[in-house]
Image: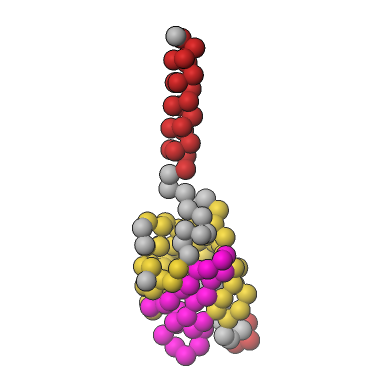
Amino acid sequence: MNMKRLALVTFLALTCGTLLTSCGKTDANEIEGTYTGTYTSSNISRDFSWSSTPTIEFKNGKYTYSELSNNNYYNCGSGNFTIEGNKILFELLDYDIPMEDIGVIDEWLLKGEYEYKFYGNKLRFSKTVTVGDKYSYEFELKRN
């Protein structure tokens, strides 16, 4: 009787542990889809910000974005993405104007490491960087 009870308790403990550690984890397939929402770029050092309404598509480990800027440039780009823990990593491979050609920093483009949260059909990710001034970049998106 004690061996059966011990086996049952061990099984339940392992099952509960597995369920608890897998809750809240997201993989790249779960966020696949097309999202629209708000992108806010802020220069924290100078108390200045602007926002736009981008569209971002995630598919097969790749992403494509458009309308990142309200101007006619820096509007689109694409690359690869991966998810590691609570981070989403964007490897920007292509965008419409090479920033270095005109002397503008490219940190505000969709590239690099962002902390993210995914819940239901909503995706939120952000990062803070210092390049001379301190900047924050935040996306709040909803799956279409």
Q: Quadrant of residue 5?
A: top left
Q: Is residue 68 shown in magenta? A: yes
Q: Is residue 69 above or below residue 87?
A: below
**Which one is in front, 30 or 113?**
30
The answer to whether one can see residue 108 in this image is no
Residue at (53% x, 68% y) in the render: 59
**Which one is in front, 104 or 55?**
55
* Relative image position of residue 115 (x, y in whole percent): 47, 57
| Colouring chosen for the image of the structure | secondary structure
Residue at (47% x, 90% y) in the render: 72
Quadrant containing the C terminus is bottom left
**Which one is in front, 3 or 101?**
3
Residue at (56% x, 76% y) in the render: 78
Residue 59 relative to residue 39: left or right:
right
Q: Quadrant of residue 44?
A: bottom left
* Relative image position of residue 60 (x, y in whole percent): 56, 66
* Relative image position of residue 105 (x, y in whole percent): 56, 77
Residue at (42% x, 56% y) in the render: 117
Q: Is residue 136 above or below residue 50?
A: above
Quadrant containing the N terminus is top left
Q: Which residues are magenta?
A: 53-76
The answer to whether one can see residue 29 in this image is yes
Q: Residue furthest top?
A: 1
Q: Is residue 60 shown in magenta? A: yes
